[in-house]
Structure formats: structure tokens, C-alpha cells
Amino acid sequence: MRAGAAGIRAVIIDLDGTMLDTVPDFEAALNGMRHDLSLAPISQAIIKPLVGKGSEKLVRDALLLDWDAARVDAAYADAMAGYQRHYLAINGDRSTLYDGVLDGLAAMQALGLRLVCVTNKPIAFALPLLAQKGLAPYFEHVFGGDSFARKKPDAMPMLGACAALDIPPAQVVAIGDSSNDAESARAAGCFVLTVPYGYNHGRPVQEIQSDGIVDSLLDAARRIGAHNATASLTN
């Protein structure tokens, strides 16, 4: 956060690639779908760069590996139904928390920060996943990829989260692992912190225009706390 900026009152946090490594869940669900369609399984290395732009694009991209666009369009409805069925059956079973997530969320709450989760994952997947991993109690609101008319990287989800909190974007930090998160936050007028361990569509996190790279959510909490301590002295 830049010097002289107002104190931070809230944090918007991404889910996949930021709080949880969910690629193993995607692997199971996508390969279940592909098996139903008589397609060969694909690896986590192939799946990882596809993650982050919502389930619709993920399913299409996983089919475009083998089929042309016309065939994908024809099979899409059945493929999506199969993917959702397989995902709901294993949601969270193979995903793992990144280091520093629980400690970071607790530290943010201790600083008096209000927390919202904004993800492009469908809300029907996001809510039970957060509950299963013990993350749900930290968040006042959770918004999925189908909670608004447009997904990240559009500004709408970030603006919607700020409106739900009744806090101006200039007093909000968004934390994510990808350009989707950063572009959405920038367009909304929020600050942006990025983590280096997520997906970012297969691109280096250093390419993202952000206010800093943090090692973990705990590191992010420390940085926000230091910013707020400085802001209280200068305002």
C-alpha cells in the first residue's frame, strides 16, 4: 500500500490458489467428466494453468484439448452436468490449505479487519468447501462466480463485496494469486496484494501489477497492520 493512503478496514480474499490448493479436486472432477465422455485423463500440470476463470471456461478448456469448438458446444451441457456431479462428490476431499492461511485470517481478525471471500468458483462449491476446511467462520460474506452478472477480472465482484461491507474500495485490500484478482481489484479501486504460490494461468506472479507480493496470508496481515499503524500516525 502506498504511503499516505487511508487505513485498511477490510480484506477481500480469493479461494483457489490463494487459500487452498484445489487442483487435486479439479483433477478428480475433470477426469471423471472426461471418463464419462470416453476421453483420456489429464494431469494436474495440464489443469493448473486452466484454473481461475470459472467452471464454464475450465470445462470448455478441458474439452478443447481433444475436440474442436463445434463439438465442445454440442457436448457442453452434458459435460458441465457431469463435471458438477463429480465435483460435488469430492469437493474438498483432496484440496489442502496453504501455509499461513489460518494464522493469517486470525491475525487479520485480531487487527479488526472485516473479511470477504470472492471467488470465481460457483457458490454451491465454495460454501461447503470453506466450511469443510474451517474457513467459513472468518468471513462475513462469500461471493462466488455466479453471485454477480460478471466474474473477475471484471470489477463487479469487488465492488459488490465493498458495497456489502459499506466500505469504500480505497480502504480495502484484495489478496489473490492471479491477474484476474489484480485486474478486478484495480478496476474497483482496491489495493492488491498477491501470493506467489498459486496458479495465475501459468504465468509468473511477478508479471501482475500489484502493491506487493506476500509470502502468505500471515505476511499479508503483518503488512496491513504496519500500514495501518503508519496511517494512524499521519492522519
Image (tube, rainbow, N blue to C red):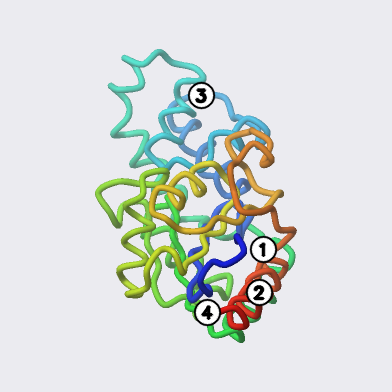
Q: Mark 3 or mark 2, which has the lower sequence index?
A: 3
Q: CA distance from mark 1 to mark 4?
A: 21 Å
Nearer to me, 95 or 4: 4
Q: Are marks 3 and 1 in contact (CB under 8 Å)?
A: no
Q: Provide residue 177's location: percent of width, then percent of height.
A: 60, 49
Q: Give the label, 3 or 4, closer to the camera.
A: 4
Q: Are marks 1 and 4 in contact (CB under 8 Å)?
A: no
Q: Mark 1 or mark 2, which has the lower sequence index?
A: 1
Name the side, left or right, on which 61 lies relative to 133: left
Q: CA distance from mark 1 to mark 2?
A: 8 Å
**Secondary structure type for disc 1:** strand
Q: Are marks 3 and 2 in contact (CB under 8 Å)?
A: no
Residue 76 vertical position relative to residue 86 in the rendered view, above or below: above
Task: Give the residue at mark 3.
Answer: 39
The amino acid pointed to by label 3 is Leu
Task: Give the residue at mark 1.
Answer: 97
Residue 89 vertical position relative to residue 111 in the rendered view, above or below: above
Q: Give the label, 3 or 1, closer to the camera.
A: 1
Q: CA distance from mark 3 to mark 4?
A: 46 Å
The amino acid pointed to by label 2 is Leu
Name the side, left or right, on which 151 lies relative to 220: left
